[in-house]
Amino acid sequence: MNLGNLIRNYGEAVAMILFGIGFSNLLLQKNLIKKIIGLNIMDTATYLFLAMKGYIDGRKAPVVVDGVQSVEAYVNPIPSGLVLTGIVVSVSVTALMLSLTIRLYRRYHTLDLDEITTRREELYPFEQKRVN
């Protein structure tokens, strides 16, 4: 692998590392709050990747100033719009997940996913399990 490409694309490499950290956190942790943090790390890595892909060195924001209307003078505004929209959705999803986590804690008095499953089976022993 060429080290020059890695140095030139350091933002994408950092985004991939962050995504891996978030994904492994999401898979390996049993605490619901830690899972939510892992999902937020994955979201942040995705936004960093999109921002790095949308940036072109030497170009300006797509606001026409001084009469310059050439497409080559500006960056593409779509990745920036996607990042902003994604951040808004991510904040909403995080708020929903945290509110559901609070409800689960009030009912089962733990944030451990395995404990919640065990206590749910203890509280509702006659609930039949569906087999598809």
Image (cartoon, rainbow, N blue to C red):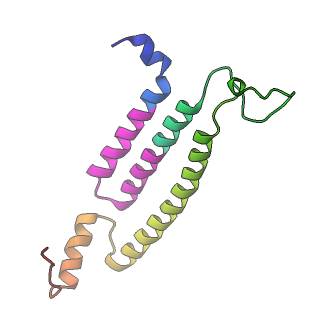
- Taking 42 as reference, is 62 above or below it? above
Residue at the right extreme? 66
Boundaries of the magenta span: 15-43
Q: Is residue 124 magenta?
A: no
Quadrant (top left, top right, bottom left, bottom right) of the C terminus: bottom left
Left-right relation of 51 to 128: right
Horizontally, residue 73 falls left or right of residue 47, namely: right
Q: Quadrant of the N terminus?
A: top left
Residue 19, given in percent of the width and then of the height, sits at 39, 40
Asked if residue 67 is positioned above or below residue 42 in the image, the reply reads above
Where residue 125 appears, as percent x and y from the top left, is 15, 85
Image label count:
0
Q: Nearer the viewer, residue 9 or 70?
A: 70
Residue for point 47% across, 42% down: 46
- At a point 44% along the width and 11% down the height, the residue shown is 4
17 above or below 30? Answer: above
The quarter of the picture where residue 13 lies is top left
Q: Kindly identify the residue that appears in the image at 37 percent across and 73 percent down.
A: 105
Where residue 67 sits in the image (x, y, percent)? 86, 28
The foreground one among 48 and 95 is: 48
Nearest the viewer among 52 and 107 is: 52
View extreme (front): residue: 70
Q: Main secondary structure of the magenta part?
A: helix
Q: Nearer the viewer, residue 131 or 20?
A: 131
Residue farthest to the bottom? 126
**Is-magenta flag for residue 25?**
yes
